[in-house]
């Protein structure tokens, strides 16, 4: 099954001509390619699939998707355990 997970962009850098965002998923930070979402800025939420941000979403949509994934128990296989401990995107502090 293909799964896109919402996360918050906390930092953007350019590496070898590629925009890379540090994206926070619960308690875990991961580097993500922002090539498919060139207008995303720090503080916005994106849906991430296999290391690529595929679309921008607002905080309410990120919360809704995160909640649904938690309810379906889909996060456990996609993220490390510490990221799946009931920490939702809206509750994050950066």
Image (spheres, rainbow, N blue to C red):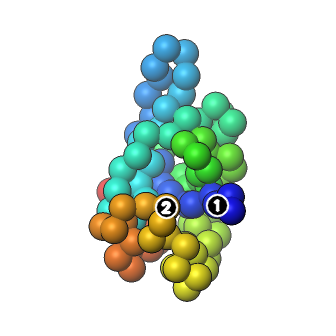
In the image, farthest residue toward the bottom: 71
Q: Residue at x 41, y 54 (%)?
A: 24
* Residue 78 to residue 55: above or below: below
Q: Nearer the viewer, residue 1 or 42?
A: 1
Q: Which residue is mark 2?
A: 78
* Residue 38 to residue 82: above or below: above
Task: Locate residue 1 relative to residue 22 in the image: left or right.
Answer: right
Residue 72 picture location, percent across and down: 58, 82
Q: Which of disc 2 and disc 1 is earlier in sequence?
A: 1
Looking at the image, do the residues carrying marks 1 and 2 touch, with CB atoms under 8 Å apart?
A: yes
Q: Which residue is mark 1?
A: 3
Q: Nearer the viewer, residue 87 or 72?
A: 72
Element type at mark 1: loop
- Figure quadrant of residue 22: top left
Element type at mark 2: loop
Residue 80 picture location, percent across and down: 36, 61
Quadrant of image for the N terminus: bottom right
Q: Nearer the viewer, residue 22 or 44?
A: 22
Quadrant of image for the C terminus: bottom left
Residue 60 picture location, percent across and down: 60, 72
Q: Residue at x 44, y 28 (%)?
A: 13
Q: What count of labels does the image hold?
A: 2
């Amino acid at each position: 099954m293909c799964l896109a997970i919402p996360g918050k962009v906390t930092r953007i850098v350019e590496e070898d001509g590629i925009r890379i965002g540090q994206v926070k998923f619960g308690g875990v930070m991961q580097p993500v390619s922002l090539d498919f979402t060139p207008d995303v800025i720090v503080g916005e939420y994106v849906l991430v699939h296999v290391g690529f941000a595929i679309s921008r979403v607002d905080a309410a949509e990120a919360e809704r998707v995160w909640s649904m994934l938690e309810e379906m128990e889909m996060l456990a296989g996609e993220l490390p355990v510490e990221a799946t401990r009931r920490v939702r995107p809206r509750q994050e502090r950066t």
